[in-house]
Image (tube, grey):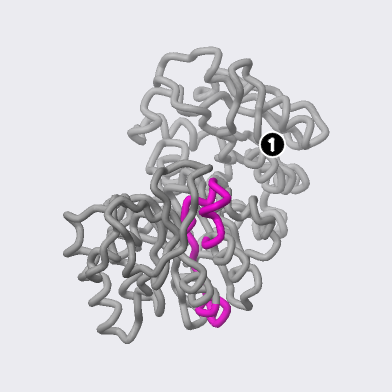
Amino acid sequence: MKVLRFEDLVRDGQAQGQRVFIRADLNVPQDDAGNITEDTRIRASVPCIAMALQGGAAVMVTSHLGRPTEGSFLAQDSLAPVAKRLGELLGREVKLVSNWVDGVAVQPGEVVLLENCRVNKGEKKNNEDLAKKMAALCDIFVHDAFGTAHRAEASTYGIAQFAKIACAGPLLAAEIDAISKALANPKRPLVAIVAGSKVSTKLTILQSLAKNVDGLIVGGGIANTFMLAAGLKIGKSLAEPDLLGEATAVIAAMKARGAEVPIPEDVVTAKAFAADAPATVKAATDVADDDLILDIGPKTAAKLAAQLKAAGTIVWNGPVGVFEFDAFAKGTEAIARAIAESDAFSIAGGGDTLAAIAKYGIEQDVGYISTGGGAFLEVLEGKTLPAFEILSRRAA
């Protein structure tokens, strides 16, 4: 995918003296007192901002925070805590600017944070007049918020249509490169892990991947539905019996290509969904009517680990068991360790997946950890994200 990259513009001196508008993702969690409880997204935005400042630009940064009502600004919607933290990370004052759509005073070498962009009327529906006003504020628009790349909003899409130059920041460019490496030009075999509670929420992902991957590992409630489709009993485990036809079709599509959806050989069960519930390992054919399947068993985990270690590319979205409960975490840990030890290029995304990566301390061993939840899922579905489409079009 060909897009203009901000890094190249800066290197070529094209940011010098220019007004640069950066759409970042600074949507961080806060406690009831408004204190930031986790600042990963702010820290991740710093390289792009620092790059712009080093390039001699006058820098404007904006982001959404929470779910404000358009046209109605409340104190809890303010990016003030973000401005303070960003200033600490950059080692300089970051002024917060309200009511900025009609004009912003900022000089080369300065950076200002523009108040919560989702408070602007017309933001979510990509109002053309609003987008044109935003575009008029800058010489260069930089999209560096992959978490919003699946939304066509005024500050993510419309501004890119009308700005003099529209390009990808380092975070977004890294996502484009990782996604292309994993899905567009993968080293084979390509193995995908898709796990979660429901097939319905990830059916289009499963159908899309079934056309491309060499192995499709399913986990969690999704695996239970596939076990039912394979004729196995799952007791009182979470599943969607009304989607057996779709699960069977995915299995058939993979088989027709000489690929497979491995069905668990053994599972870890309990009689109740609780951290202290006694865990029992049993063959997948021996699940009792009152059993809950809460993890894959050791034989299945070992078989899947071997498949992952032999892979060329791995895409990971979702833990394969209830890894929050230690008794039912061994399957997810085995998967995580296998990915860490594999020579494959791996890309991982999704909140639970990131939590598992953190739990097992394998951040340095995963090829690329995606910063976008919904955007990552839409890529797996085979969709072209609005941000990618408009930046690609502007680069043509």
Q: Which residue lies most toward the bottom here?
A: 258
Residue at 65 percent of width and 56 percent of height = 360
Relative to the observer, which residue lies in front, 140 or 116? 116
Give the quarter of the image for residue 287: bottom left
Q: Is residue 286 left or right of residue 388?
A: left
Residue at 51 percent of width and 47 percent of height = 351
Q: Magenta includes 325?
A: yes
Q: Which residues are magenta?
A: 306-331
Q: Magenta includes 230?
A: no
Residue 304 in picture, x, y percent from top left: 49, 74
Relative to the observer, which residue lies in front, 25 or 14? 25
Relative to the observer, which residue lies in front, 81 or 292? 292
Residue 145 higher or lower than 63, as above or below? below
Please state which amino acid type lies under the numbered disc 1.
Ala
Quadrant location, the C terminus: bottom left
Residue 10 in picture, x, y percent from top left: 69, 54
Number of numbered discs: 1
Residue 130 in picture, x, y percent from top left: 41, 30
Q: Can you see residue 8? A: yes
Give the quarter of the image for residue 122: top left
Residue at 46 percent of width and 30 percent of height = 133
Mark 1: give few (<14), some (14-19) or many (20+) Cα within 10 Å. many
Q: Which residue is identified by label 1?
A: 58
Q: Can you see residue 165? A: no
Residue 176 higher or lower than 300, as above or below? above
Q: Is residue 10 left or right of residue 309?
A: right
Residue 155 in picture, x, y percent from top left: 47, 37
Relative to the observer, which residue lies in front, 349 or 100? 349
The kind of secondary structure element at disc 1 is: strand
Residue at 48 percent of width and 50 percent of height = 322
